Amino acid sequence: MIPSPLRALIAALALAPALQAQRGTVVVSNMNDATATVIDAATGRVVATLATGEGPHEVTVSRDGRTAAVSNYGLRGKPGNTISIIDVARAEVVRTLTITGHQRPHGMAFLPGDTLLAVTAEASKALLLVDVRDGRVVTTRPTSGRVSHMVSLTADGERAFTGNIADGTLSMLTIRGTDSARVVKVARQPEGLAATPDGRLVFVGSNADSVVLVVDAASGAVVDTLRGFGLPYRMQVTPDGRTVVVTDPMKAQVRAFDVNTRRARWTLDVPADSLVSTAEVPRSPSPEGITTSRDGRHVFVTLQGRNRMIVIDTDNGSIVRWAPTGTWSDGIGFSPIVSKR
């Protein structure tokens, strides 16, 4: 028989890699509160709640992990035009950028070097390159589509993809080029999308048709269709390009698929207890915003209908941690840096 202290040591060693993978900081936007919740990824402890602009929607984190950006989309009838910049280690808003001449900033992604931020501006039908140091709009790239909502970049930051909700199209742009966006027809109300790191495939969710289309970026052709969704709201491809994970608030599910074969890997039915009165989808915990750890071993998802954030094991789809957020939690970003606050 193995002595109890030795058994405890063996168990601790077995758990160590998982604990190490979760070290870092999660930033969640809370639409109703005009705040961002900063959470210790390893413990679920709320480190800080920070004031943002009105209607904070999406969150992205710089490639070095030091900075998080929150797009302040605004309210109904009151468009926003600011981005809150957060120092992750200090858990503080260090500046607020005003996107002069543009409204409704939404989807965002940092370019290599972490000084430029690609931002969709819905009211301008454009993708902006914004200097995060002073808010200056360096470049405006027309998407040639109405209501360009989300953006996904290739790993090298050379190409961008936006879903244009009002037109049912996908725009493909070269970030630093001057050519017009290449626009292809996809499906009705394409909102959530995610490109593989190499830009070979783009997964596009249709709110109206309840499917995820797989688009070959080179040809612009739809090469596959993933079905069985209620509302494929957000999606994320793991950094290794092997797995795409989709949140579905209508069916209260998070689903994972193999990128290459498109076969289902797992489906997580998110528990529907402790629902809040502000739940967007009645009787659903509403899994919505999504991001992954840098090693792809964990997925982080906001539960708008429970004011919570969950951490999911990417291998098997099990929930390994919960954490509280503010009201109407939406966008989410992960940094490998642990907040010192």
Image (cartoon, rainbow, N blue to C red):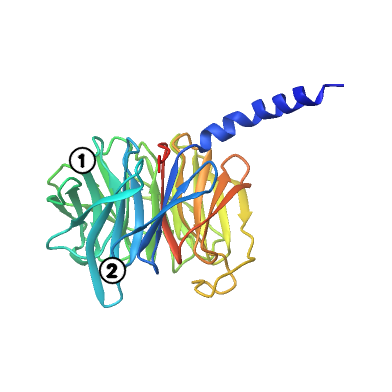
Residue type indicated by callout 1:
Thr
The residue that disc 2 covers is: 74
Residues under labels 1 and 2: Cα distance? Answer: 24 Å
Q: Is residue 17 left or right of residue 152?
A: right
Count the labels in the image: 2
Nearest to the observer: residue 198 or residue 326: 326
Residue at 57% over, 46% down: 312
- Look at the image and tell me whether residue 262 can be seen: no
Evaluate if marks 1 and 2 touch, with contact meaning CB atoms under 8 Å apart: no
Identify the element where label 2 is drawn: strand
Image quarter (top left, top right, bottom left or bottom right) of the C terminus: top left
Q: Is residue 121 left or right of residue 290?
A: left
The residue that disc 1 covers is: 115
Nearest to the observer: residue 109 or residue 241: 109
User: Considering only order in the chain, which callout, 2 or 1, is on the residue closer to the N terminus?
Assistant: 2
Residue at 27% over, 55% down: 84
Q: Residue furthest bottom?
A: 77
Label 2 neighbourhood size at 10 Å, few (<14), some (14-19), many (20+)? many
Residue type indicated by callout 2:
Gly
Please provide percent x and percent y for residue 164.
Answer: 30, 62
Image quarter (top left, top right, bottom left or bottom right) of the N terminus: top right
Please provide percent x and percent y for residue 11.
Answer: 70, 29
Quadrant of res 77: bottom left
Q: Is residue 31 above or below residue 11?
A: below
Please provide percent x and percent y for residue 258.
Answer: 54, 42
